[in-house]
Image: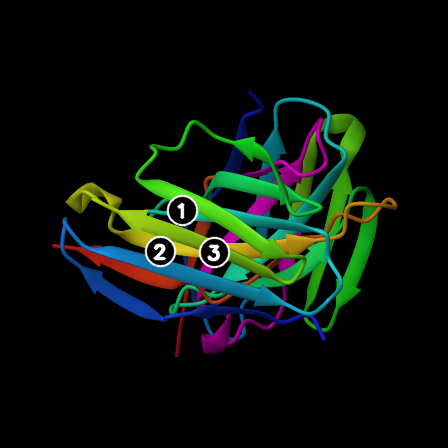
Amino acid sequence: GIQVEQSPPDLILQEGANSTLRCNFSDSVNNLQWFHQNPWGQLINLFYIPSGTKQNGRLSATTVATERYSLLYISSSQTTDSGVYFCAVHTGTASKLTFGTGTRLQVTL
Amino acid sequence: DTEVTQTPKHLVMGMTNKKSLKCEQHMGHRAMYWYKQKAKKPPELMFVYSYEKLSINESVPSRFSPECPNSSLLNLHLHALQPEDSALYLCASSQITGARYEQYFGPGTRLTVT
């Protein structure tokens, strides 16, 4: 099956810093989602981005499907950004969503 | 509204108990999903229902029994679980038709098997 790797696995930032999270996938995908999982376990939809670039406030994402990667940019980080960030890809059967390994982000004061 | 609800939030059960997890969505989605997430791991797909019919079972043990009574509801019946089944159980839903299959997740049920 498809492999989805994220880097870095762990990241500690001071409040106000910027960061880039990367998602690499081993095969062609139909679509890609980015999620933020908060400390209570809720998965929050950030982006649905099969290709191109999207922005939402301090967050933006870019997917280059032909090169099999996606990037999530977080600017001016806040403590509420802490948690785990997952990318997840839709392959073959559109119903099947495969999650990446995750990036655990901690934002400190 | 992009809300998926799950009950209960927390559940502690013994290995001989029978319990059920419930999931509900009112977005008109015709696909619903169960995922299992162990600590410090990504969610893993368990079951997919499309138009209220089971379309994917990822080789899940029979002690987990899914049910989709109608297009808005999804249940997961639990029986004779093992301590290693303790995990966060997540429900999700999505459209089936069209090009957008974005999945939306509920808050999860944190299950502890004693």
Relative to A47, say whether A63 is above or below: above
Toward the viewer: B78 or B44?
B78
| Position in image of residue B77 (x %, y %) | 37, 51
> Residue A29, image x and y in percent?
72, 30
- Mark 3 is on which residue type? Asn
Give x and y (percent) for residue B63: 30, 39
Query: Magenta region: which residues?
Result: A72-98
Label 3 Cα neighbours within 10 Å, binned few <14 / some 14-19 / many ≥20: some
Going from N to C along the chain, the mark reached first, 1 or 2, is 1
Going by the numbered disc 1, the residue's amino acid type is Lys
Cα–Cα span, label 3 and label 2: 15 Å
The magenta stretch spans residue B62: no
Q: Which residue is mark 3?
A: B75
Would you name the residue on which mark 2 appears?
B88
At x 58% / y 24%, what residue is drawn? A2
Q: Are marks 1 and 3 in contact (CB under 8 Å)?
A: no
Label placed on residue B36: 1
State the separation of the CA atoms marked 1 and 2.
6 Å
**In 3D space, how far apart are the residues under numbered discs 1 and 3 (Cα atoms)?**
14 Å
Q: How many marks?
A: 3
Residue type marked 2: Leu
Mark 3 vs 2, N-terminal side: 3
- Mark 2 falls on what kind of element? strand
Q: Chain of mark 2?
A: B
* Magenta span includes A90: yes
